[in-house]
Image: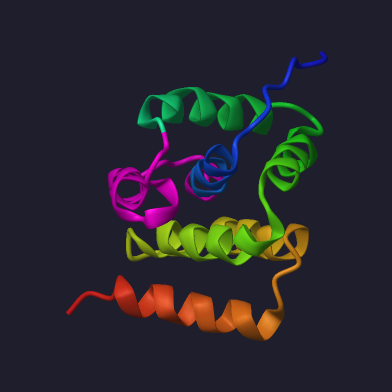
Amino acid sequence: MTLDLPSFSACDALVAVMVAVSASDENIRTAELIAIERMVNHTPVFARYDIDRMRAISQTVLTLFEEEDGLDALFGLIRDALPEHLFDTAYVLACDVAASDGRSGEVEAQMLAEIRLQLSIDRLHAAAIEMSARARHRLL
């Protein structure tokens, strides 16, 4: 089956990365959805983003997850839409979503590793970003 894929804006790509991390373990938790919404509402990069696009972008991600080569297609859309200077921003947002529910499982860790690879995030920088996300979302 060949999908007619939409083109993403840079902000769509950032939303897609966050949704991909959340959906990677096939269990989208409320805390993750709240984190995504909070980041879209409060992160400066999303200042002019049409929040109504989030549903369509989320559906595209979920549809691609069901396809055989869907992950490759998703990362193609993301890389095409995202300027290189926002690659680390995408990784920061992804890590915040992964950490938001207080549990980061093996599947989410694998998705973060794939994002690192696809967006050429330096391993040392990634470790600092991951540690910062865990610290921000730590519970007493």
Q: Is residue 135 magenta?
A: no
10 vs 104, left or right, is: right
User: Furthest-left residue in view?
Assistant: 140
Q: Quadrant of the C terminus?
A: bottom left
102 above or below 124? above
Q: Is residue 16 above or below residue 43?
A: above
Q: Position of residue 67 (x, y in %)?
A: 74, 27
Quarter of the image with the N terminus is top right
Residue visible at 37% across and 32% down in the picture: 51
Quarter-wise, where is residue 74 in the image? top right
Query: Which stretch did the figure color magenta?
Result: 20-49
Task: Tell me which residue sits at (34%, 43%) in the image.
Answer: 33
**Quarter of the image holding residue 54?**
top left
Estimate the x, y position of residue 113 in percent, counting from the top left.
68, 65
Q: Which residue is depicted at the point 30% across and 70% down?
A: 137
Q: Position of residue 22 (x, y in %)?
A: 47, 47
Asked whether residue 31 is drawn in magenta, I would say: yes
Give the prevailing secondary structure in the magenta stretch: helix
Is residue 92 positioned above or below 136 on the image?
A: above
